Image: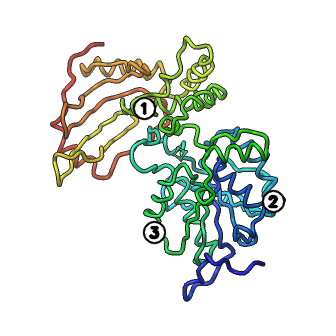
Amino acid sequence: MPSTPAWLPEPLPGLGRGDVDVVINWGLGRDSSSIIARLLDDPAAHGIDLERTAVIHMATGDEWPDTIADAERFMLPLFRRHRLRLVQLARAGQTMAAGIEVLDDSRCPARLVTRGSWTLWEEMESNGTVPQQAGTRLCSLHAKAEVGDRWIPAATGGGPFRQIIGFNADEPGRAKADAVMSKNPLRTAVFPLIEWGWGLKDCENYLFDRFGIWWKKSYCTFCCFPVSMGSLPAHLDRMRAHPEIAGRVLRLEYTSMALNPNGRLFGKRSLLEHFSPADPASREVLDAFQRELDCPWAIYEVRRILPVSKADPTVRAPALRSVARLTFGTPSQTGRHLIKVSDKHDVPVEIDPEYGSARAWLKKRGQGFPTVEHFLVAAPFFVKDKQQERFEREWAAHRGLGRPAFTSQV
Ligand code: SF4
């Protein structure tokens, strides 16, 4: 066994060393797959003792099937040949208290386990949301980073470890952000691609030379980031090649926009607007979307508060939302029910111009902030009742705001 590499500090007093000193994060994509393939050519040259190394993969539950197929076909044989330990993990539930699941832990992995008992999709759909574009990628933190962070101390015995991450030479800012965010004194983050000067193109070429395929990007099928990373055309092609997946993602966006007219997948733009019925290549996607909408539906009561900061009333505070499922039925039953309710209470029903969902407004948001909005909407059944603990208190304090919607237009 090689001696302790120079980068690895001695264990802290009172702490032993577990089975693992080196953790390699594998997202199945081009960057981390290149690193693993190259390191395996000569592990010792990179200070790697394979006996004390674990590759961790965090399954989000909605990776593209072609990425999984390529990873199983080309990467898993390398793991088996070198007896490199692959630990497949997933979050066990929506809350941190639910813990994590080890889906597989093997030096001879036969397949990739695509999901655990909880998936990001379920979180999004039961909340009636899509991944948030602005700010920190909370979905990634919850489904990946927090899962790995929970597994590592048990494997390292609470000792120091080196974590190999696949940020490439085109994105040095991510490595800098990692240094700022990392609070773990036992962890030494290493970015081989930046050390080697390998950008994304280098990784693509390396994998092509090695395996004879252009490795596909790895990400959740409903991710919003392809649009900001300039890969939207490739993303849409992939959706057209997998119309059933695209239809399902459109259902997620439909539900999100039913509960929040601003809840588009790509911020200002929706996924739906990229598929035109006039475009033959998009027709299969739109047909699959219609099939997805043929599911149980519900009428939801949505109340939203758009508050301002208590410390500084010129600054917006995070929105508060209450969603309650009032009744359920088929799409046409819930639509008829909504119209009946709007007739009875003399509130207008509006049809969303993008997705066509029917919404009965009880109160529309006002021009400035703070303000509120209140409506009933028909949408697929999968959203669960939810509101913040302080919602009713805040609603009572804000309910005089917003614009009443009282003229029946049905
Ligand atoms: S791929 Fe996209 S949706 Fe999935 S965890 Fe990462 S940022 Fe979130």
Q: Give percent across and percent down for residue 259.
A: 38, 33
> Which badge, 3 or 2, is on the more N-terminal residue?
2
Q: Is residue 189 left or right of residue 376?
A: right
**268 vs 372, nearest the viewer:** 268
Q: Quadrant of residue 46?
A: bottom right
Q: Is residue 271 left or right of residue 197?
A: left
Q: Which residue is mark 1?
A: 264
Q: Secondary structure at mark 1?
A: loop
Please give the name of the residue rendered at 70% of the width and 43% of the height, measured from the top-left corner. 205
Q: For the residue carrying disc 1, how many other residues have a C-alpha within 10 Å: few (<14), some (14-19), or many (20+)?
A: many
**6 vs 383, nearest the viewer:** 6
User: Which part of the image, by quadrant, shows the N terminus?
Assistant: bottom right
Q: Secondary structure at mark 3?
A: loop
Q: Which residue is mark 2?
A: 108
Q: Which residue is mark 3?
A: 183
User: Mark 2 belongs to which amino acid?
Assistant: Cys
Q: Secondary structure at mark 2?
A: loop
User: Mark 1 belongs to which amino acid?
Assistant: Arg
User: Mark 3 belongs to which amino acid?
Assistant: Lys
Q: Is residue 114 left or right of residue 225?
A: right
Q: For the residue carrying disc 2, how many other residues have a C-alpha within 10 Å: few (<14), some (14-19), or many (20+)?
A: some
> Which badge, 3 or 1, is on the more N-terminal residue?
3
